[in-house]
Image (spheres, rainbow, N blue to C red):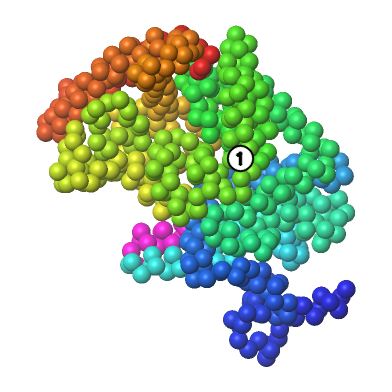
Amino acid sequence: MQDTYTVKLKLLQDGEIGNSQAPDIIAFKDNGQVRYLRINDPKLADIMKNRASPVFGSFVRSLASMNRYFAFINTQASPEFIISNFARDLQAALVNINQNDARGLAIDLLKNIRPSLAATFRAELGTPDTNNRMDLFYNEFKREGGRMTFFGLKDFATLQKQIQKEVARGGSNSATRVFGKALDFVGKANSAVENATRLATYATLRERGYTPKQSAYAARNITVNFTRKGTAGPLLNSFYLFYNANIQGTARMIQALATSRKAQKIMLGVMAFGFFRDILNRILGGEDETGIPFYDKIPEYTRRQNFILMNPLKIGTGDYFKFTMPYGYSVFDYAGQLMASVMPREMLGAGMSPSKAAYRLSMAAIDNFNPLGGSYSIFQAISPTILTPLVDLALNMDFSGRPIMPTPNPFDPTPPPDPQRYWNNVNPVSKWVAEKINELTGGSKARAGAVDVSPETLDYAVEFLSGAVGKFGERLVTLPFRGMAAAKGDLPLEDLVGEIPMYRKLSGRVPSYVDISRYQEMRSEVLTIADDLKIAQQEGDRAKAIEIRREAQPELRMVGFIKSTEQRLKELRSQKRKLQEAYKRTESEAILNRIRANRERQKELMIRALDRYNSSVDDKI
């Protein structure tokens, strides 16, 4: 066996290297020194050099480079990823380590996590403590191959240096230097966090008597081992961002649950805890003006992927604490939540129908276990990363299922132009740009110009191209302006909370757009039913018309009320546009107060319609 292994792999000395770019030679780093390895097995060489697919031409390589860029800006370069990645890794490790038979491993790992985090930070920053127990473990852990190169993408370090180099070319001013140093620090911090849980695992196992190789292997595989990939992995990773990570994460979870009774019991406990926490959150959160618990107004995607606890010190405000849960494992917590949600409201449930709960659970499972990446529709799920913007904008739906921009009334003969379709927390710069483009191409606040684009569309495009790091920068720059707008009452406080960098990863508040979205969904449902009835009557389908009247009596009673509400909202929106034009000319405080009153009146009308709808069809909300 040893002879076979040495035939396939040969470590090259300086005089043996020749062409380092040869198809059978790969480069790697050993304690910071570049070494070269010759692989005499062509298939293994193809896998190691990401040439496994015969169609791996220039187009696919371009896609691969693009996805490496997207991976970089959404992970290693993102300050907020430090929080979410650490939370996911630690929780997953506490479950996965139970595959080992020894008792108390999870507790020991938890004890080691803080010194491990300090040690990996010191190592990344180049300031190791040679007398520290965990720093000594780190050196051994790295030497044995336990350390993970961030996300297993060797190009990350090169890409980071290229970005810093390009920034430096832009000038030698302090801003570019600060950006370069910040990018370097964030990259090192993310790398430290990526390896902290692995180091804690390594130290825990070594202290229990495991060999260095056993401990390093377990540490490398305690969460997602990004270096593992099949022959089709590079090709699929070129089309779908994080394809390999999704596959490895799912496989790791299945392995833990299939081989460990302890892990299975933990997941049953997670499900039970999700059930009781769901009930507790309805008690702690209080209710809004329509009698709906604030907890039930938290966007579904947020509840699906995060541990949520309503703030007991701020009942009735929609405030809550949160932290990200691991992909896959979060489905069990969400299943417990849904079990509680199907109970009647009198029993502190949400009155959700079992069919709706089953649908949401199936969507959560698809979102978590789909190797092509999380999404809310089948079209989004199968679309390669490069086509994601086109599909999302066509559906007016982001990955979480939230509308990218407000949905206009489909029955309105004169809907507002796209520059007027935005949420309360709109980026003021994007709003100005969208309106100015519309104006310069012949449009107005009531009429679409030749270029008719929503500020939300602009924000979406910028966010897609700049990723999480770009959105973090945008939030950081606009935070003072949003803060001033909130202080003046022009921006709801709940929308400001969701835009505070870093803080938003640990805390939240029900955003104002939730009520607007709920009203729009209810409006569409009621008016669509009315339209179905009208078509059945026009076509002479008496049986269909009788069935609609029988099954949808509450909705049909709402039709007249919805139409009158829509007419009043249209008048208020028209008044608001005129007031905004007047305010631009005069900057009068009196006009500004009228704009605020107009916005509040619109909200009151939608809340009143929702309240009446809830009273009529309580079981559908």
Vertical arrangement, residue 320 with respect to residue 183, above or below: above
Return the residue nearer the eye: 371 or 85: 371
Q: Is residue 412 left or right of residue 222?
A: left
Q: Say if the magenta span includes residue 175.
A: yes
Location of residue 218 (image quadrant): bottom right
Residue annotated with mark 1: 366
Vertical arrangement, residue 572 with respect to residue 365, above or below: above
Location of residue 45 (image quadrant): bottom right
Q: Which kind of residue does numbered mark 1 sit on?
A: Ile
Please, which residue is most extreme toward the bottom here?
Answer: 15
- Magenta span: chief secondary structure: helix
Secondary structure state at the residue bearing disc 1: helix
Q: Say if the magenta span includes residue 108.
A: no
Location of residue 559 (image quadrant): top left
Magenta residues, as a range? 172-185
In percent of width and height, residue 358 lies at: 62, 27
